[in-house]
């Protein structure tokens, strides 16, 4: 018997910042690149980075931030192109390398605070409840909810025309689904064995189709190795 779940969407909202942003070490690394060596309290690091970036031209600042956050992932030429594309494109959703999406979002956030050239980014927060509707579903909810299972549960509430289905039809249908961890950036889980409450943080590009959905049923399964 396949696992079954009842899903209720409690709230869907737009945010301009992740609940867990860049680490203090990352901010310190940026300040070092910006030749800022004065001691700074952790709660003021972001503000000091933004101020230090304003001493540079916008494109130079963008390339410095991207080079640090995407170290080794993109070539200098790709970073130069990205620094221009971020001015009018949602690259934290659209960049072809999904592993770059969250770092690009964090870079966009810093640059938008420093320069008017870069628009502020946004992501979605969705609060949901997942309740077991079968014995197999209850068994799965006794274990930590993995990204592949959670993305498949969310996909069951969307039409087949949704971007998630069009790009990941095979991975939704059967394992493996390695991209799932890059679709869901952060999520918090609470609840008992039969019901879970989750706060999910992800690009609207992926979970936007659920904005006006109230409830639905899912027959999603995890990856074999979950």
Image: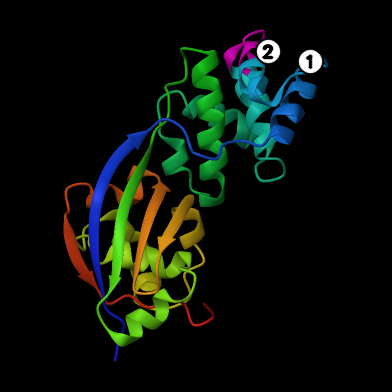
What residue is disc 1 on? 36
What residue is disc 2 on? 52
Nearer to us in this view, 86 or 9: 9
Which comes sooner in the sequence, label 1 or label 2?
A: 1
**Residue 13 on image: x %, y %:** 29, 39
Occupied quadrant, residue 79: top right
Q: In the displayed structure, would residue 162 be above or below residue 82?
A: below
Q: CA distance from mark 1 to mark 2?
A: 8 Å
The residue at 77%/23% (across/down) is 33
**Residue 155 on image: x %, y %:** 29, 63
**Residue 16 on image: x %, y %:** 41, 30
The residue at 21%/63% (across/down) is 160
Look at the numbered discs 1 and 2 and tell me whether their residues touch, using CB distance below 8 Å.
yes
Residue 54 belongs to the span the image colors magenta: yes
Q: Regarding mark 1 in the picture, which secondary structure is present there?
A: loop
The residue at 64%/24% (across/down) is 43
**164 left or right of 44?**
left
Q: What range of the chain is rendered magenta?
A: 50-58
Nearer to us in this view, 58 or 202: 202
Residue 9 belongs to the span the image colors magenta: no
Report the residue that reaches farthest toward the front: 192
Instruction: Answer few, some or many: residues within 10 Å of disc 2's Cα (few below 14, many 20 plus, some between 14 and 19).
Output: some
**Residue 113 on image: x %, y %:** 51, 17
């Amino acid at each position: 018997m396949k696992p079954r779940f009842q899903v209720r969407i409690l709230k869907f909202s737009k945010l301009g910042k992740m609940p867990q942003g860049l680490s203090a070490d990352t901010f310190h690394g940026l300040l070092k690149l910006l030749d800022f060596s004065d001691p700074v309290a952790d709660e003021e690091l972001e503000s000091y980075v933004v101020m230090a970036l304003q001493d540079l031209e916008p494109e130079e600042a963008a390339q410095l931030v991207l080079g640090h956050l995407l170290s080794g992932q993109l070539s200098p030429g790709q970073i130069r192109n990205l620094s221009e594309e971020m001015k009018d494109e949602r690259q934290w959703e659209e960049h072809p390398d999904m592993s770059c999406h969250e770092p690009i979002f964090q870079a966009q956030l810093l640059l938008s605070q420093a320069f008017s050239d870069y628009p502020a980014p946004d992501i979605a927060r969705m609060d949901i409840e997942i309740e077991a509707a079968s014995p197999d579903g209850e068994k799965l909810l006794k274990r930590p909810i993995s990204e592949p299972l959670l993305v498949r549960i969310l996909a069951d509430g969307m039409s087949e025309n949704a971007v998630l289905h069009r790009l990941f039809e095979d991975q939704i249908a059967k394992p493996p689904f390695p991209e799932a961890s890059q679709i869901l950036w952060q999520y918090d889980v609470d609840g008992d064995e039969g019901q879970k409450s989750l706060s999910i943080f992800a690009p609207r590009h992926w979970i936007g189709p659920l904005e006006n959905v109230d409830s639905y049923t899912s027959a999603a399964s995890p990856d074999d190795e979950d």
